[in-house]
Image (cartoon, grey):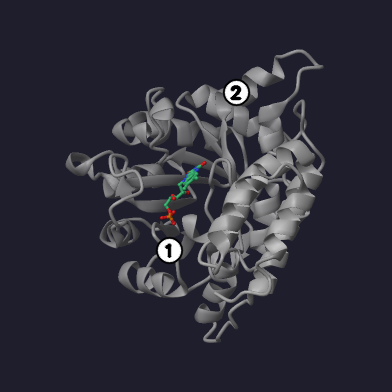
Amino acid sequence: MAPVRIGDLTLRHGLMLAPMAGVTDASFRALCRRFGAEYTVSEMISAKALCYEQKGRESAPARTAALAAIGHAEWPCAIQLFGSDPEFMAQAATLIEGGSYRGALPGPMPVAIDINMGCPVQKVVSNGEGSALMKEPLLAEKIVAAIKKTVSLPVTVKIRAGWDENSRNAVEFAKRMEAAGADLITVHGRTRQQFYAPKSDNKIIADVKAAVKIPVIGNGDLFTAEDVRHILEETGCDGVMIARGALGNPFLFTEITAMLEGRNAPPQTVAERVDVALAHARAMIEKKGERIGVAEARKHMAWYCKGLRGAACVRDGVMRAETFEEIKRLLTTLKGTSE
Ligand SMILES: Cc1cc2nc3c(=O)[nH]c(=O)nc-3n(C[C@H](O)[C@H](O)[C@H](O)COP(=O)(O)O)c2cc1C
């Protein structure tokens, strides 16, 4: 695999953590970086919400802006925007590049603005946003061009195979995004109608790769290092983006890196897995406070438990935990067990 270039940045393997709303917050991004992800992307951020929030009262909480905060431990990190109005999208991208908006936190600049053209959620597509843009290639072009015109950061686009089986337009669409100025494109090999099943189609990723000159990142169903080997062989894509495979399993990035470098990665022990899970929960609580941190950490803790002996009962307890100490007590009981 040749290195992937995004602006001034060069990624040796093009191994990326995918954006996941409600999952890839700063703590998880930093953790995945530590285990080998070379690049991370924020949760999706509404361009309109970010712009409107700036007009709110000084004292009102800047919740959308908080999603765009990046720490050094997660860098290189891109910010993903969603929206359907080229003006709002460009305005939001300008705010992010400038870094001086209300609610902004000190930290490094993002490495790119990513545009969400793949979200299948009804609430999003009914506003013409996310994967609905694949039905409106002209508007999608305008969005890319408007952002390119206003910021100097690289602009990347994340798409699906198409809207449905009758409109698998990823190839034509990707060519148009490239012509509009996109610097990189990620392709999830499913249509909007498929949501997350059945299996992602590598053929459409290969077709996009053959059709454009910008780097193409393959995405969809990458749960093991072997899955990554296949997608690279089958599509010739320049890099990969891991989403659900990383849930409770940031170690996957270490395994993929070892595979790409022709090494073996030793499997982690249950005790190591528990320690990483607890460090993850602790980081979330440090950033968000115990009440919100614990509430948001519960699902991650359940994912770390998956496949471990005796985990079902621990998982149930974790989903009701109110404090870090409770999470710690429950997870520690798994330490003496094996997978
Ligand atoms: C919980 C969850 C949240 C997601 N949120 C986003 C998002 O904010 N932006 C986006 O572009 N894709 C989002 N996705 C899609 C993933 O980035 C990815 O394209 C998809 O899950 C396919 O990859 P996978 O099969 O490896 O999971 C989300 C997926 C999941 C499971």
Q: Which residue is mark 2?
A: 49
Amino acid at dot 1? Leu
Closer to viewer: mark 1 or mark 2: 1
Residue name at image x 56 percent, y 80 percent: 258
When the figure is inspected, residue 60 is found, relative to residue 265, above or below; the finding is above
Residue 96 vs residue 255, the one in the foreground: 255
- Mark 2 lies on a secondary structure that is helix
Label 1 neighbour load within 10 Å: few <14, some 14-19, many 20+: many
- Mark 1 lies on a secondary structure that is loop
The x, y position of residue 312, in whole percent, is 53, 58
Residue name at image x 70 percent, y 51 percent: 27
The x, y position of residue 70, in whole percent, is 72, 46
Give the quarter of the figure containing the C terminus. bottom right
Q: Earlier in the sequence, mark 1 or mark 2?
A: 2
Q: Quadrant of residue 296?
A: top right
When the figure is inspected, residue 11 is found, relative to residue 281, above or below; the finding is below
Q: Which mark is residue 222?
A: 1
The x, y position of residue 201, in whole percent, is 28, 58
Amino acid at dot 2? Ala
Residue 109 vs residue 123, the one in the foreground: 123
Visible in this render: residue 71? no
- Using residue 110 as the reference point, say whether residue 262 is left or right of it: left
Q: CA distance from mark 1 to mark 2?
A: 32 Å
Residue name at image x 72 percent, y 64 percent: 332
Residue extending farthest left? 166
Q: Are marks 1 and 2 in contact (CB under 8 Å)?
A: no
Q: Is mark 1 within 8 Å of ligand 1?
A: yes
Q: Is mark 2 within 8 Å of ligand 1?
A: no
- Using residue 303 as the reference point, say whether residue 133 is left or right of it: left
Q: Quadrant of residue 228?
A: bottom left
